[in-house]
Amino acid sequence: MVGYRSSRLSKIGPYFFSEFNRRREELKAEGVDVINLGVGDPDLPPPEHVLDALANAVRDPRAHRYPPFGGTREFREAVAIWYRRRFNVAVDPEREVLALIGSKDGLAHLPLAILNPGDITLVPDPGYPTYHASTIIADCDEVSVLLRADRGYLPDLQAIPRTLAKRARILFLNYPNNPTAAVATLEFFEKAIAFAREHSILLVHDNSYSEVAYDGLCPPSLLQADGAREVGIEFHSLSKTYAMAGWRIGIAVGNANAIGALAAMKTNVDSGVPWAIQQAGIAALTGPEGPTRDRVAVYQRRRDQLVAGLASLGWHPPRPQATFYLWLQVPDGRTGQDFAKDVLDLTGVVLTPGIGYGKEGERFVRVSFTTPGERLEEAIDRLVRAFGTTTGQTYDLAMHSRQPDDST
Ligand SMILES: *Cc1c(COP(=O)(O)O)cnc(C)c1O
């Protein structure tokens, strides 16, 4: 049955995680205490001063009116202040800043705003699924750019055939990276800018995790690199930085032409970010940074807890320097999908199969730590019970499932 589904939508494919979610819901219905290490959805609340700003704003008459397209002047100025404070970069709040209904809004609409049907985008594999989906929705074609461990999950831009690079219009980048947790240096961005210049490509940098970094690391902005605003646009999310995922607010900053096109596109699609949410965004961007540092310290402790717990199982994902994800190569060469299914059935712990981020993710799972420490402890206990602690032991589901307690 074709029904009302467009060919565009059909091409994006069924939502990968839906089957997996069904199994999770089944287990829940059976009374299993499911521990979800699948989603990257901050569990700690936004800072108190941000909650106060929102509470005050909803009683202001301005909250009930349509907000200005593209964000209030005050919000865009707050973004400029934050860019100056955090990255020492000056941006023009009028022409180089745009408020978004989450960074996903901007990422999803940008190809529609600047590309023509048949244009090519360069999409990282593995990568956040919206880069792929937005390409298809705009009737464009994607070419995968592989991210591999031996290059620190940075794309090898020189390996992209020149004829292809000449035809490409967008290159999506995302560092700190979801799902691999890789980080990029300013030198990498400089190389990407040279590549973009040479081939007239727009660099689209998704910097959603710039503030979720550990051990004192301060991930850079693309706009810190020379010439970035001639060829680049950068997205930020208040979802991850301030745990405001449910509030839907994000930012685009960079090339004034691209910002203008995206803003024009969006005037046809939505009517802006609710005014009260923008007021909360201003409080978040210009207010005290202590709460954000405290939250990151919690994530860092969880990271260490999880890395140590998995090591006791003989599993050794790299210790992430940023994001709240571990990118774990599945033991024994199985697919991430099989592995995640077994882990779910045996332990009630949800991991995300890497294939959801592209073919290169096939032999990986993503483990998220937006879950309290006690629950992480419980998840590790269950994994240890199911899989044993012998370092380097071959993962063998049949063996483990043949040792139920009821045999004694
Ligand atoms: C979470 C996430 C987003 C979406 O963030 P919103 O601002 O909530 O829309 C975008 N990109 C990446 C890589 C993400 O992980």
Image (cartoon, rainbow, N blue to C red):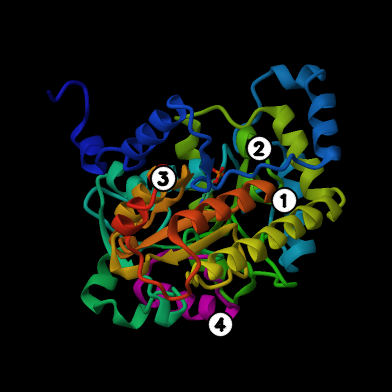
Task: Confirm if mark 2 falls within 8 A of ligand 1.
Answer: no
Q: Is residue 405 above or below residue 18?
A: below
Q: Label 4, on which residue?
A: 187
The local secondary structure at tag 4 comes to: helix
Q: Whole-Å distance between the Cαs marked 3 and 4?
A: 41 Å
The local secondary structure at tag 2 comes to: loop
> Is 182 covered by the magenta stretch?
yes
Q: Earlier in the sequence, mark 1 or mark 3?
A: 1
The x, y position of residue 151, in whole percent, is 42, 81
Instruction: Report crowding for label 2: few under 14, some 14 to 19, many 20 or more residues within 10 A (C-alpha).
Output: many
Q: Label 3, on which residue?
A: 344
Task: Confirm if mark 1 falls within 8 A of ligand 1.
Answer: no
Q: Nearer the viewer, residue 358 or 368?
A: 368
Q: Which residues are magenta?
A: 180-203
Q: Quadrant of the N terminus?
A: top left
Q: Label 2, on which residue?
A: 71
Q: Whole-Å distance between the Cαs marked 4 and 2?
A: 32 Å
Q: Tell me the residue at 76%/36% (across/down).
A: 280
Going by the numbered disc 1, the residue's amino acid type is: Val
Instruction: Find residue 226 and report its image quarter.
Output: bottom right
> Is 298 covered by the magenta stretch?
no
Going by the numbered disc 2, the residue's amino acid type is: Gly
Q: Residue furthest left?
A: 1
Q: Is residue 4 above or below residue 141?
A: above
Q: Earlier in the sequence, mark 3 or mark 4?
A: 4
